[in-house]
Image (tube, grey):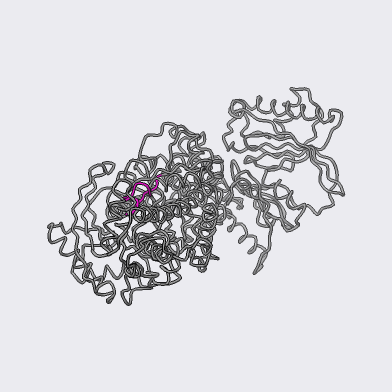
């Protein structure tokens, strides 16, 4: 039956977490906006106010940043006038503010800004840590004009009335959250808490993306389950006894808080009383006694129940309690009363365990763990007052959630101390947030920044196209001699070479009526060859071609060959291209200024391979545009975002200064990777970009490419992470020797880390492979850094593309341009966004 209750609790939790079903949920699963537990670096003076059942407690806490080993604490308790609980809301908050003023006057507190954490043990709807509306009163409170109001605002106004303008309410939490934070002190974080007192509730650290009622999507967020209302929709009707029904009917809120009425200390004495009344009516107890007293509500207190079930003194305590009611119990009566008290308290413990097991299983599943190891903070007069309650809670939880290992930690100081920790953590995170934002601010581009990049790109394009201005342009705008896009009627068999990054491909392409058929093989080019001599590089290329032809029985055929050569070339014809400069880590000597087709043919002669007929040499952007154009005639732009980046597009012939002729269009290879080499992008370049640039083999060159392409993004992220470590914002400031190694943080890690819905556990695993011991907070921050760098790269790419499409639209005198962009490159294909 407890497994069934656990299953129902899980269902109720999922209902509360979902935006679609939240409004109908009994287990409300309220976001608390507490996203972190203490890490021991918290320091400063903090004020805490705790609203309790019959009093207000104020605390002054000083944290020293020493792992919270020796906090200094002063506190004072103020008894609350009885009429305040049912009076006006304003009177309640005025009373609390007066307590704060008296407390501060008594300890001669300094007048610097004093952050205050407020423990308010009622259901609230948070929209921030310092903004929460009361949903409903409970535990005997019913102050007017408070429900639906912002509690923080009410308290802050009352504090301001007392002229305590240096006191700021920065965090509001319930007692469960306070308990969780209190128990986070023992060196290890506590991620679940359970309160069973006059009421009952639980909270736990959930994965933020599952808390749909909050806007946060990364990291964790503490959720207050508000499980006291579990069963209000009838899901517990099959375990409610007639005694529970009687207790409910006599309560101030019949039909509500059904779970709370089965487990909390406010009701257990009443359940026992109704059982005794029923048994006395059956003549099974107190024969010969006048049992009318048992019909009086509240005659049995929870403290008496707990003392009765104490095995050694219990029988004597039962006799004392029953005789005090005017009953004359026999030895057997005392024994049976003890059994009944044990049964009622044990049931409360097992039901709490079923709820706790549901929370633990949910955490285990959502984090995709085989085994969850977690600390659970417990604050409960039942737990403190009766050892057996804790033992049952522990053993039944293990039974119902065997995949979870939960260590129960008793709360040290109720919840006030935990409230100080919530406040301290909030201040630490706010300070860290400010510093992180400062580090990342230069990488965050506004719309105005992007419009400026677009305008600069347009300016450089015009310079590059002009016959006289071309030499001063950073965007070379090279004619390709490709004057038309495919129309779909092309047929034949072709050999293709593709050189442009870390790999070299040889392909056999057959274009037929039924489509395009391809066979290909990838050959790796070692760095020793890409950075060696031109002869060795082109000899290696010819060897790869010969190997491919041998494998495909092509040694006897001379097929027309297309050579995709993805480096800046001055094209002198479709089959003649002079290399202007190497990019993407290539630096083979003796090639710049040479015709690459000539270099290929010379290598073929050296290798005595005579069957090469090079028809066209094209840039990869052109190749991309043409391949997409085969399927879509509107494709007139090619874009590459991979190891490097570049773009090409169809320009009006009359605008191409380097080539004679006015009619038609020609594809222009922009070579936009070099955009900014003349300094026009210097204010977009950050210190991180400069560090990356300095360590490349072509410092000061390909500046735009170094902001965007796959070869560099991982390095930019690595330098940002090092800066965050240095500022002690990441990995607790511990040195990270592996992170000092150039190239260790590959761009593929960005793609992996940014996958939507990827559990932070998997982010941590990626970081652990780099010997980085990341906390959950670290993982969230690393993901944010990756997202910031990727977003900027994509936005800069978009600004460049916007310049191209605007120019095409204006060239053609159109109000609207519909155009297709063919895109290729590992970064575009592999990155999730």
Q: Position of residue 228 (x, y in %)?
A: 42, 62
Quick check: 21 left or right of 558?
left
Quick check: 553 left or right of 794?
right
Residue at the limit of the structure toward the front, as seen here: 288
The answer to whether one can see residue 176 in this image is no
Q: Position of residue 56 (x, y in %)?
A: 23, 63
Q: Nearer the viewer, residue 566 or 535?
A: 566
Residue at 69% across, 50% down: 659
Q: Position of residue 51 (x, y in %)?
A: 27, 63
Residue at 65% across, 60% down: 808
Magenta residues, as a range? Answer: 375-389
Q: Nearer the viewer, residue 322 or 717?
A: 322
- Above/below status of 644 relative to 156: above
The answer to whether one can see residue 233 in this image is yes
Q: Does 546 appear in magenta?
A: no
Quarter residue 66 falls in:
top left
Quick check: 621 left or right of 60?
right
Residue at 15% across, 56% down: 110
Q: Nearer the viewer, residue 206 or 375?
A: 375
Q: Position of residue 720 (x, y in %)?
A: 43, 43
Residue at 27% across, 68% down: 155
- Above/below status of 692 relative to 170: above
Quarter residue 134 falls in:
bottom left
- Above/below status of 608 relative to 349: above
Q: How many marks?
A: 0
- Above/below status of 282 relative to 548: below
Q: Which quadrant holds the N terminus?
A: bottom right
Quick check: 33 left or right of 300?
right
């Amino acid at each position: 039956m407890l497994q069934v209750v656990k299953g129902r609790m899980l269902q109720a939790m999922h209902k509360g977490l979902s935006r679609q079903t939240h409004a109908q949920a009994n287990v409300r699963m309220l976001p608390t906006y507490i996203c972190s537990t203490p890490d021991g670096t918290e320091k400063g003076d903090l004020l805490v106010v705790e609203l309790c059942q019959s009093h207000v407690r104020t605390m002054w806490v000083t944290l020293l940043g020493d792992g919270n080993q020796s906090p200094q604490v002063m506190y004072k308790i103020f008894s609350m006038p009885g009429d305040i609980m049912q009076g006006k809301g304003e009177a309640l908050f005025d009373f609390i503010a007066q307590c704060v003023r008296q407390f501060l006057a008594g300890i001669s507190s300094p007048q610097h800004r004093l952050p205050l954490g407020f423990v308010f043990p009622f259901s609230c709807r948070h929209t921030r840590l310092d903004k929460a509306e009361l949903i409903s009163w409970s535990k005997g409170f019913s102050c007017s004009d408070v429900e639906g109001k912002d509690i923080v605002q009410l308290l802050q106004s009352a504090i301001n009335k007392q002229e305590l303008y240096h006191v700021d309410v920065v965090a509001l939490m319930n007692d469960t959250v306070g308990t969780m934070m209190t128990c986070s002190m023992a060196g290890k974080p506590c991620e679940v808490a359970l309160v069973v007192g006059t009421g009952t509730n639980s909270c736990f650290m959930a994965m933020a993306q599952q808390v749909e009622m909050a806007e946060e999507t990364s990291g964790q967020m503490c959720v207050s389950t508000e499980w006291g209302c579990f069963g209000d929709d009838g899901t517990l009707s099959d375990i409610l006894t007639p005694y529970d029904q009687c207790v409910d009917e006599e309560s101030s809120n019949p039909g509500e808080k059904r779970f709370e009425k089965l487990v909390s200390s406010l009701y257990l004495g009443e359940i026992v009383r109704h059982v005794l009344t029923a048994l006395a009516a059956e003549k099974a107890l107190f024969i010969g006694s006048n049992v009318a007293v048992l019909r009086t509500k509240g005659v049995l207190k929870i403290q008496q129940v707990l003392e009765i079930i104490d095995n050694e003194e219990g029988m004597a305590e039962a006799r004392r309690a029953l005789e005090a009611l005017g009953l004359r119990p026999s030895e057997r009566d005392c024994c049976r009363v003890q059994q009944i008290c044990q049964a009622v308290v044990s049931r409360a413990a097992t039901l709490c365990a079923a709820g706790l097991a549901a929370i633990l299983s949910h955490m285990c599943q959502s984090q995709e763990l085989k085994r969850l190891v977690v600390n659970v903070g417990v604050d409960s007069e039942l737990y403190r007052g009766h050892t057996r309650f804790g033992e049952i809670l522990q053993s039944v939880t293990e039974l119902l959630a065997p995949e979870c290992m939960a260590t129960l930690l008793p709360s040290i100081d109720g919840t006030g101390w935990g409230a100080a920790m919530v406040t301290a953590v909030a201040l630490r995170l706010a300070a860290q947030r400010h510093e992180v934002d400062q580090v990342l601010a230069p990488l965050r581009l506004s719309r105005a920044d992007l419009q400026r990049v677009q305008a600069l790109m347009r300016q450089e394009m015009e310079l590059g196209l002009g016959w006289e201005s071309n030499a001063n342009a950073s965007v070379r705008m090279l004619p390709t001699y490709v004057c038309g896009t495919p129309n779909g009627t092309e047929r034949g068999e072709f050999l293709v070479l593709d050189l442009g990054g870390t790999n070299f491909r040889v392909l056999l392409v057959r274009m037929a009526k039924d489509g395009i058929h391809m066979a290909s093989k990838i050959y790796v080019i070692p760095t020793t060859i890409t950075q060696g001599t031109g002869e060795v590089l082109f000899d290696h290329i010819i060897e790869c071609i010969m190997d491919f032809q041998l494998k495909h029985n092509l040694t006897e055929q001379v097929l027309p060959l297309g050579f995709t050569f993805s480096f800046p070339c001055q094209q002198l014809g479709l089959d003649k291209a002079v290399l202007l400069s190497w990019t993407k880590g290539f630096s083979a000597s003796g090639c710049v200024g040479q015709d690459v087709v000539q270099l290929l043919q010379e290598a073929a002669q050296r290798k005595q391979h005579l069957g090469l007929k090079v028809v066209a040499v094209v840039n990869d952007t052109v190749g991309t545009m043409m391949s997409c154009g085969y399927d879509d005639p509107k494709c007139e732009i090619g874009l590459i975002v991979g190891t490097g980046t570049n773009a090409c597009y169809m320009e009006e012939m009359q605008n191409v200064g380097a080539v004679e002729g006015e009619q038609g269009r020609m594809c222009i290879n922009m070579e936009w990777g070099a955009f900014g080499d003349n300094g026009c992008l210097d204010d977009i370049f950050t210190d991180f970009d400069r560090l990356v640039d300095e360590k490349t083999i072509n410092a000061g060159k390909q500046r735009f490419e170094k902001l965007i392409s796959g070869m560099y993004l991982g390095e930019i992220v690595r330098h940002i992470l090092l800066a965050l470590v240095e500022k002690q914002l990441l990995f607790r400031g511990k040195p990270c020797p592996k992170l000092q190694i150039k190239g260790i943080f590959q761009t593929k890690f960005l793609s992996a880390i940014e996958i939507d819905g990827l559990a932070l556990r998997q982010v941590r695993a990626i970081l652990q492979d780099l010997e980085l011991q990341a906390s959950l907070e670290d993982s969230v921050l690393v993901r944010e850094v990756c997202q910031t760098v990727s977003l900027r790269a994509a936005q800069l790419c978009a600004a460049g593309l916007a310049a191209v499409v605007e120019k095409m639209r204006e060239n053609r005198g159109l109000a609207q341009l519909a155009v297709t962009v063919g895109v290729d490159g590992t970064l575009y294909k592999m990155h999730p966004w």
